[in-house]
Image: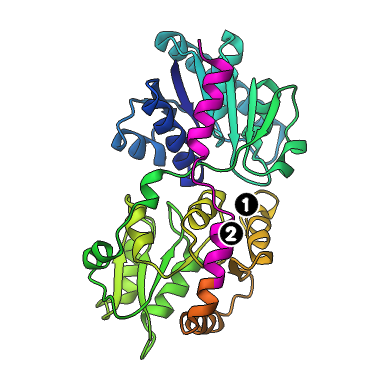
Amino acid sequence: MRVILAGGGTGGHVYPALAMGDALRERGHHVEYMGDPDRLESRVAPERGYTFHPLRAPKYPRGGLSGKARFAFSLLGATWRARGKLKELNAELILGVGGYISAPTILAAWTLGIPRVIHEANLAPGLANRLCAKVASLVLLTYEQSGPRLGGPAVKHTVGCPVNPKVLQGDREEALAHYGLSPDQPVLLMMGGSLGAATLNAVALAAARMQDRPWQLLWITGPRYHEEASRDLGQVPPGVALVDYENQMGRAYAAADIVLARAGSSTLSEITALGKPAVLIPSPNVTDNHQEANARGLEHLGAVMVFVEKGLDINRTLDRITQLLRQPSALQSMSEASRAQGKTQVAEQVAELLESTFGK
């Protein structure tokens, strides 16, 4: 099959798309990527060997009839351009992963009669997937509870969130050597997602400045915040590795004894697949506060600890992390609870489902 991946904007959309794309390519299918030329997918997809087709599309305006009218005309134009590209590529299947850029490609495929699959990574579906579900041929869910929020006649399958197998293959000794960290102290991995997160960087800065810190810090700032973080930190203290962006997350996870992160579905899928204990600070700037809902489910199972961003006490957060790292039995318990929720074969299962449903 000639498959087009569509969507993106953030790692939570892009990395699951590429995991599914990789699984399809391994089965001999031809896969290309259509997305925003100014967002993450335009850089990451070509790095992974995908032909990238740029498409610009409007974001949905939050108010005003005139803005919504302009949006409708802009979406129509983007859909028309996507239609032309899909015809040129002889596309046979579209796999949309959400983000506003996925909508015109899915809609264009609908007008052409090309099969359309969408994957929803989060508990609360975004606007693009809510629209695309109405014309989808098949809907793939990470959480079964998302199903009623996605209308349309398509069959829905709960499959989970795909994880890149390479994320699971890091070597701890090699990772520690790469980052210049010692094997004699535990490591906290702090990451704020593909773009970074100001609140998590504030926690990491306080951690890096701690006196007599009994653990090490692997701090992935995100490219948006790296210059500011480097300036605020000054000379990097011993036991701290400062990284702007990591495109080999398997290495970062291999170095970590515990993870401090947001609670996007893609991140949680990686953490649970690896069985990593985690402290989560969900982003409040998401649809229906779905990150906290994601995180609370894992907290209830004993796999993670959750702190709410509003009114966050940074010192208390760091104290709890220190206490956890001094309690190997507690970390082991969290690790086991996390791993029990992990799914490592989602991408392969999706590829098999798409073959059986749409293959020739």
Question: Disc 2 versus disc 1: distance between alpha carbons?
Answer: 7 Å
Report the predominant secondary structure element of the magenta stretch.
helix
Residue located farthest toward the right when viewing the structure as drawn: 148
- Quarter of the image for residue 280 reads bottom right
Question: Which residues make up the magenta segment?
Answer: 333-360
Q: Are marks 2 and 1 in contact (CB under 8 Å)?
A: yes
| Few, some or many residues within 10 Å of mark 1 (<14, 14–19, 20+) | few
Residue under circle 2?
283
Q: Is residue 340 magenta?
A: yes
Tell me which residue sits at (54%, 55%) in the image: 268
Q: Is residue 340 above or below residue 146?
A: below
Q: Secondary structure at mark 2?
A: loop
The residue tagged with tag 1: helix, strand or loop? loop
Rendering quarter of residue 179: bottom left
**Any mark on residue 286, and which?**
1
Q: On the rendered image, what quadrant is the N terminus found in?
A: top left
Q: Position of residue 340 (x, y in %)?
A: 58, 57
Return the x and y of residue 227 as percentages of the image width and height.
31, 63
Residue 110: quarter of image: top right
On the rendered structure, is 124 left or right of 205? right
- Amino acid carrying label 1: it is Val
Q: Is residue 254 visible?
A: yes
Q: Nearer the viewer, residue 278 or 27?
A: 27
Could you tell whether 303 is left or right of 177 in the image?
right
Residue at the spot 62% in from the left edge and 42% down from the top edge: 142
| 1, 11: nearer the viewer | 1
Residue occupying image coordinates x 70% and y 51%: 288
